[in-house]
Image (cartoon, rainbow, N blue to C red):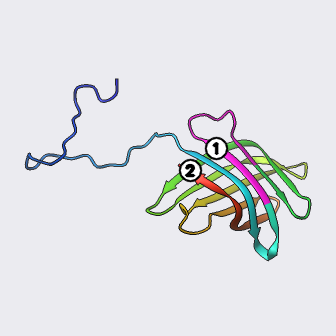
Amino acid sequence: MVGGNRYGWFSTEEIPDLAIDNSLRVGLCHNGDGDGDVEGNGGHKAHMHFHKNTCESRDDDVEEDDDSGGHFQSTAITSATFVPDENSETATIIGTGLHNGLPVGFTLVAVDNQGLAPAVYSLILTDGYVIAGNVIAGGIVLQ
């Protein structure tokens, strides 16, 4: 039972000096999905795909193929942080994977601007590979 008999909802505050808890709830599930084309630094293009659900990790995945034939595939996701803002949400996903068959660490940062501006995608690998730019086809949805 959530809340038990100790919680109530008030549409207006009718009791002076009543302590109101307006803190942000934590521990909620977050979900992030991205699939599309990124136009990155130096005119390089890549196709990215990722999925992360903070409550269910069985289908979590990060993949990216760039226009030079490079391929990245995650093997483990060690952390994921979702930060909401007024008109956007940012996800930071950290883990390990294989870049062209060699083991690397990765940091993915995705920004969902809720249609107000293009979504932004960044993938940084520990071997020095970086792609960062606007999503020009497809999209990112963070919740």
Q: Residue furthest top?
A: 1
First in sequence, mark 2 or 1: give its number: 1
Residue drawn 81% across and 75% down? 43
Query: What secondary structure is found at the residue carrying circle 1?
Result: strand
The correct choice, above or below, for 134 with respect to 57 in the image is below
Q: Quadrant of residue 79?
A: top right
Residue type pointed to by label 2: Thr
Residue type pointed to by label 1: Lys
Looking at the rendering, in which quadrant would you find the N terminus? top left
Residue drawn 91% across and 64% down? 68
Q: Quadrant of residue 128?
A: bottom right
Query: What secondary structure is found at the residue carrying circle 2?
Result: strand
The correct choice, above or below, for 8 with respect to 33 in the image is above
The 10 Å Cα crowd at callout 1, few under 14, some 14 to 19, many 20 or more, is many
Q: Which mark is residue 52?
A: 1
Left or right? Give the position of 83 relative to 92. Answer: left
The correct choice, above or below, for 143 with respect to 117 in the image is above
Left or right? Give the position of 69 relative to 41. Answer: right
Residue drawn 64% across and 51% down? 93
Left or right? Give the position of 107 relative to 80. Answer: right
Reply yes or no: does residue 121 show up in magenta: no
Question: Of discs 2 and 1, which sits in the foreground?
Answer: 1
Residue that numbered label 2 is attached to: 81
Residue stretch rendered in magenta on the structure: 47-62
Give residue 48's position: percent from left, percent from top: 76, 55
- Report, in whole angstroms, how far the alpha carbon at label 2 lies from the one at label 1: 10 Å
Give residue 99's position: percent from left, percent from top: 85, 53
Q: Quadrant of residue 132?
A: bottom right
Residue drawn 60% across and 48% down? 32
